[in-house]
Image (spheres, rainbow, N blue to C red):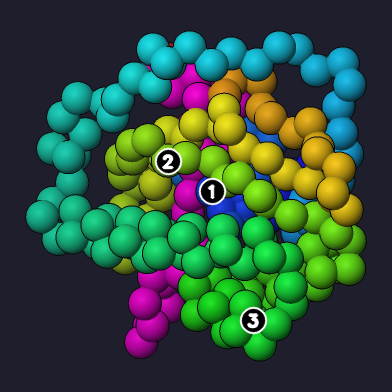
Amino acid sequence: MRLSYHLVSLTLIAALSGSLTACGGEDDPQTKPSPRTTTSTNAPSPSNDSSEAGGPPSGWEDKFTRGQLNSYNAALRRWEQYTKLSNEIYRKGKNTPKARKTLREYSLFWQRDVATLARDFDKGGVRIEVPEEPLWTYAKSVKPTYVVIVQCTDYSNIKYTKNGDVLDNKPKHLITPFVVRMGKVEGEDWKFERGALKDKTSCVA
């Protein structure tokens, strides 16, 4: 099953805490509104070699001004806060006033995420019991109204369930990039906009 963020995937859906989708353009990750809903019985064996974690491209900061790096760091902090809070939301899977308030605070499309929470988690029985683990990040693009973050993410230990049954939903590469787009509107802080799982290669490729 694929989350609309981070993993919601979040990291969710995202979740996202966060949104997981098929591979798209890195500067324009696309989102699907619903989480993963199917299990796989014939998926290829995932690769989890720790050497796949790699590291950020050398000198990536040199491509940006100090002001742009400040924007990136601010957007990254908000993404990390959102990931932590949304992981807890999707672990519990309840459409509560507190959960809705958090999604509204951190997501540009919070109505979409509330609908996903209500339909697939609260009513559908989906839970993210063990979320993915972020390893490192760097900025792909920094504009006044959006920041694109590439996050190398470890999916080795993720555990999603549906009504208590474990879902087989790990990506082909267990250590693989997740691209996050954080958006900003005037007078507000950075908020999660959308994300995309980049599973064609591992983070080091």
Compared across the picture, whether 6 is left or right of 59 comes to: right
- Of labels 2 and 3, earlier in sequence is 3
Hey, what amino acid is under mark 1? Thr
Q: Nearer the viewer, residue 174 or 125?
A: 125
**Crowding at mark 1 (Cα within 10 Å: few <14, some 14-19, many 20+):** many
List x then y, in percent, for residue 170. Answer: 69, 30
- Of labels 2 and 1, earlier in sequence is 1
Magenta highlight on residue 200: yes
Hey, what amino acid is under mark 3? Arg
**Residue drawn at the location 46% of the way across and 60% of the way down:** 84
**Residue named by callout 1:** 11
Hey, what amino acid is under mark 2? Pro
**Crowding at mark 3 (Cα within 10 Å: few <14, some 14-19, many 20+):** some
- Of labels 1 and 3, earlier in sequence is 1
Compared across the picture, whether 107 is left or right of 35 comes to: left
* Residue projecting furthest to the front: 164
**Range covered by the magenta-colored residues:** 175-204
Can you say whether 67 is above or below 187 in the image?
A: above
**Residue drawn at the location 30% of the way across and 25% of the way down:** 55
List x then y, in percent, for residue 83. Answer: 48, 58
Q: Find out whether the residues at labels 2 and 1 contact each other: C-beta distance under 8 Å.
A: yes
Q: Nearer the viewer, residue 128 or 28?
A: 128
**Residue drawn at the location 39% of the way across and 12% of the way down:** 51
Quadrant, the C terminus? top left
**Residue named by callout 3:** 100
List x then y, in percent, for residue 66. Answer: 10, 55
**Residue named by callout 2:** 134
Q: CA distance from mark 2 to mark 3?
A: 24 Å
